[in-house]
Image: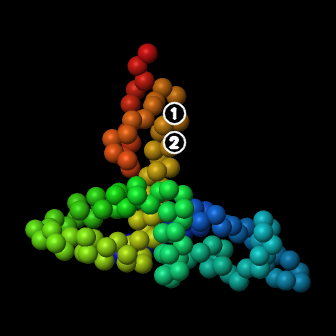
Amino acid sequence: MHELTEDDKKRLTEFLGECLHEPYWHDMRGTICYKCDHSLNGISDMYRQFTTWEDLGALKEKLVETGKWNDFDEWAYMKWDSLKPFNDLSRRLEEQSDWLFTLNRFCWLVSEFLRKEQQCAETWTQPGHQHIHVRSHQHRPVERRE
């Protein structure tokens, strides 16, 4: 199974626009976040842990809200398709949906998608490179010819 790393959880928390809490000790209230003043109850309260269906729903909604759902869905489909060739096309969509909407796997896939998207963005901003669209979700750097 795909276990989320602490970096995955941080990436997903940031994607949702939530605070990555930075703790400091406060005499009266215990440990609080110096960025948002939220009271913290240990490491699990520093950011979402992505262990609930509400977390999956929040990620899915954020993908839709940011216009990334179609690219993510196509990317995840290609990942699934490469793992499991099918002869029975009538069950293909149903089985892919069952595979995708498994809690741990979905959260991990979103984190991987965001990580790869960031890597592509960093490549595109390097001097001497431009990007071309291979498909709506895939990009590859090419040398700029002048």
Q: Do the residues labelled 1 and 2 touch (CB within 8 Å)?
A: yes
- Horizontally, residue 129 falls left or right of residue 84, namely right
Neighbourhood count class around disc 2 (C-alpha, 10 Å): few under 14, some 14–19, many 20 upward: few
Residue topped by disc 1? 126
Tell me which corner region of the image, top left, top right, bottom left or bottom right, holds residue 40. Answer: bottom right
Q: Which of 44 and 125 is in front in this view?
A: 125
Give the percent coordinates (x, y) of residue 79. 29, 60
Give the percent coordinates (x, y) of residue 48. 59, 75
Under circle 2, the secondary element is helix
Colouring convention used in this rendered image of the protein? rainbow
Amino acid type, residue under disc 2 in the picture? Glu
* Residue 92 to residue 142: above or below: below
> Extreme top residue here?
146
> Extreme right residue here?
28
- Horizontally, residue 96 falls left or right of residue 122, namely left
Amino acid type, residue under disc 1 in the picture? Gln
Tell me which corner region of the image, top left, top right, bottom left or bottom right, holds residue 76. Answer: bottom left
Residue at coordinates 43% horizontally, 15% vertically from top-left?
A: 146
The answer, for residue 36, to whether it is visible in the render is yes
Residue topped by disc 2? 122
Q: Nearer the viewer, residue 75 or 70?
A: 70
Q: How many labels does the image show?
A: 2
